[in-house]
Each structure stands twice: as structure tokens, then as C-alpha cells.
Amino acid sequence: MSDIEAIYAQHFNGVYRYVFSLCREEALAEEITQETFYKAMEHLDQFHGQCKLFVWLCQIAKNTYFTYAKKRRRLVEMDDRSPAPPAPDMEEALFDQETAWALHQRLHKLREPYKEVFSLRVFGELSFSQIGELFGKTDSWARLIFYRAKKELRRGLDEPVM
């Protein structure tokens, strides 16, 4: 078994789960994961052990997904012929949109690493141990930073947005 086959066998499921947590589409997650391993195979000589291999693969996967999402967004913006789906309850939808907007404004203003740890945990659905590994820290550190980020966001929701 070659190095890339061993790497693929060992890390495919973890990278796939990470990508799936970003996109929530099985077929897309599989495609991005395949692209990730293709890019890793092309650039394996550039990996010098500066971080764990799984972390390096997740970074490639994240960049690949964000590049795909950016292209997808541009295509959707260009295709203005598709009507927006109607909201079931306008008042509820407006409230949810306003709350989500306020939360995203607060999240955007959080300082690092609070912002990234919160995003990885909530939107990326990574475990604390995976987050700690990405930062080169412990899972306890990730829990503490996540707790502090939540505390900041809760406090911020009671105050007006500037």
C-alpha cells in the first residue's frame, strides 16, 4: 500500500465528516473530500509535519469547500430567474432573520480565537478535541474558549448593535 493509499484509508472518514458538517450535502461532501485527497496527493511534498496530517487535510478541505461555495454563490447571483421560496409565516421568519442577523453581527465582532472556535463548534459541528487539535491546544482549552464566546454573544444580544 502506498503512502497516499494509507493516508486515504486512515483519514477519509474524518475529512468527509468535517466537509459534511460544512455543506450538509452528502454528494457534495464526497466530491470535496475526493478533491481534497487529490490536492493532498499533488502537494504531499509540501507537507513537512508543521501540523498533524489530519489538520492539514482539513485545511485543504475547508479551502476547497469555500472556493466551491464562492463560485456557487456567483452562479446563483447571475441566475436571477429563480423566484425566492415563500416564507410560511412572515412575522416568524422576520423575527428569526433579525435574531440571526444580530447574532451574526455579534459573532463578527468577537475577537479571535472566540469567533473561530464558536463557528467551528456551532456551524462546523466539530468536537472540542478536533477544535483543540486544529489550534494545537487541548479539548479543555476549546471548551473554555467556546464557553467564553457564548457568554460574550449572550451579553451582546442584550445590548444594541453599534
Image (tube, grey):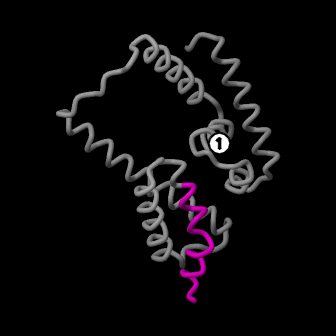
Q: Residues within 10 Å of mark 1 (few under 14, many from 20)?
A: some
Q: Which residue appears farthest toward the left when viewing the image?
A: 81
Q: Going by the image, does 129 lie left or right of 12?
A: right
**Residue at the image position 28 percent from the left and 27 percent from the top:** 84
- In the displayed structure image, the side of residue 123 where residue 117 appears, left or right: right
What's drawn in magenta, residue-wise? 1-18
Residue 18, horizontal then vertical, whole percent: 57, 55
User: Which type of secondary structure does the marked residue at label 1 adopt?
Assistant: helix
Quadrant of res 130: bottom right
Q: Quadrant of the N terminus?
A: bottom right
- The reply to whether the magenta stretch includes residue 7 is yes
In the image, residue 101 above or below residue 81: above
How many marks are shown on the rendered structure?
Answer: 1
Picture coordinates of residue 23, whole percent (x, y): 47, 48
Q: Which residue is mark 1?
A: 121
Q: Residue at coordinates 75% horizontally, 31% vertically from top-left? A: 148
**Residue 120, above or below 20:** above
Residue 111 at what x, y percent from top left? 65, 33
> Magenta segment, principal secondary structure?
helix
Taking the spot 54% from the left edge, 79% from the top edge, the residue there is 45
Of 55 and 80, nearer the camera is 80
Q: Position of residue 17 (x, y in %)?
A: 57, 57
* Relative to 157, residue 139 above or below: below
Quadrant for the C terminus in the image: top right
Q: Nearer the viewer, residue 85 or 126?
A: 85
Q: Residue furthest bottom?
A: 1
| Furthest residue toward right | 140
Is-magenta flag for residue 68?
no
Amino acid carrying label 1: it is Arg
